[in-house]
């Protein structure tokens, strides 16, 4: 069975949401990211030499990494879930969003996770994230989801990283469309199921 290596609160929540939305059977393995160990004490670097989550171990033993790739893999193995279009310009538009979330929003939070980051650099990082939030808020201004009227892989990823605003006490009230979006996505059954499985609560 496919196994998702994950850590509560980390970006591995995104493929976990996608697995639930896709209805794909899976196991999860919790990773201690500080010790880079699994629950049995084994070395996580033996699974993923990058040392990061998520990683997805396939039935044949192959291991995939990087959120944008895992989300595509999950979507392509459950086409009826319509997490990513199978082909055409709509597919590439969603891949645009996945890569934007990965390189601009996800990585934008990076300096905030490092306790050694100087205050001025942290402030600049928050200001930079604000620009990304403004772009996304305009896209979400009419309600719904990132790619129409249903949950997609892009929503699984964006919802996951937007949760970090709470962790770093970033006030999202200047972007009411994002506040409403987080609430809307958080009420989706696959998201609730993933949060319950990860024991994060809502």
Image (tube, rainbow, N blue to C red):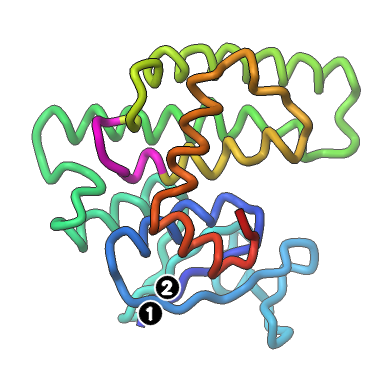
Q: Is residue 136 left or right of residue 29?
A: left
Q: Position of residue 7 (x, y in %)?
A: 64, 63
Q: Position of residue 89 (x, y in %)?
A: 13, 27
Residue depth check, mark 1 versus mark 2: number of the one nearer the observer: 2
Q: Residue furthest left?
A: 88
Q: Position of residue 3 (x, y in %)?
A: 44, 75
Foreground of the two, 159 or 78: 159
Foreground of the two, 45 or 78: 78
Task: List the residue tagged with mark 2.
Answer: 57
Neighbor class of circle 2 (other Cα within 10 Å; few <14, some 14-19, many 20+) is many
Against 52, is 106 above or below? above
Q: Where is residue 186 in the image (x, y as percent from the top left)?
A: 49, 46
Q: Which mark is drawn over residue 33?
A: none
Question: Which residue appears at 48% of the width and 20% of the height?
Answer: 177
Please say whether residue 24 is one of the residues in the magenta stretch.
no
Q: In this view, does 165 lie to the left or right of 189?
A: right
Task: List the residue tagged with mark 1.
Answer: 61
Q: What stretch is highlighted in magenta?
A: 147-155
Foreground of the two, 12 or 116: 12
Against 133, is 110 above or below? below
């Amino acid at each position: 069975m496919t196994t998702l290596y994950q850590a509560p609160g980390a970006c591995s929540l995104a493929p976990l949401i996608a697995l639930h939305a896709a209805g794909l059977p899976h196991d999860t393995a919790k990773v201690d990211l500080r010790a880079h160990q699994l629950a049995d004490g084994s070395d996580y670097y033996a699974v993923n030499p990058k040392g990061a989550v998520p990683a997805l171990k396939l039935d044949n033993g192959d291991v995939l990494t990087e959120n944008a790739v895992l989300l595509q893999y999950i979507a392509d193995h459950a086409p009826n879930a319509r997490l990513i279009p199978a082909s055409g310009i709509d597919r590439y538009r969603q891949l645009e969003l996945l890569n934007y979330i990965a390189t601009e929003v996800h990585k934008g939070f990076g300096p905030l996770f490092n306790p050694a980051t100087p205050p001025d650099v942290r402030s600049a990082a928050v200001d930079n994230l604000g620009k990304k939030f403004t772009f996304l808020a305009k896209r979400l201004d009419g309600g719904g989801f990132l790619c129409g009227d249903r949950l997609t892989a892009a929503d699984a990823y964006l919802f996951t990283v937007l949760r970090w605003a709470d962790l770093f006490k970033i006030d999202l009230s200047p972007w009411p469309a994002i506040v409403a979006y987080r609430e809307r996505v958080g009420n989706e059954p696959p998201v609730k199921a993933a949060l319950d499985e990860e024991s994060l609560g809502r």
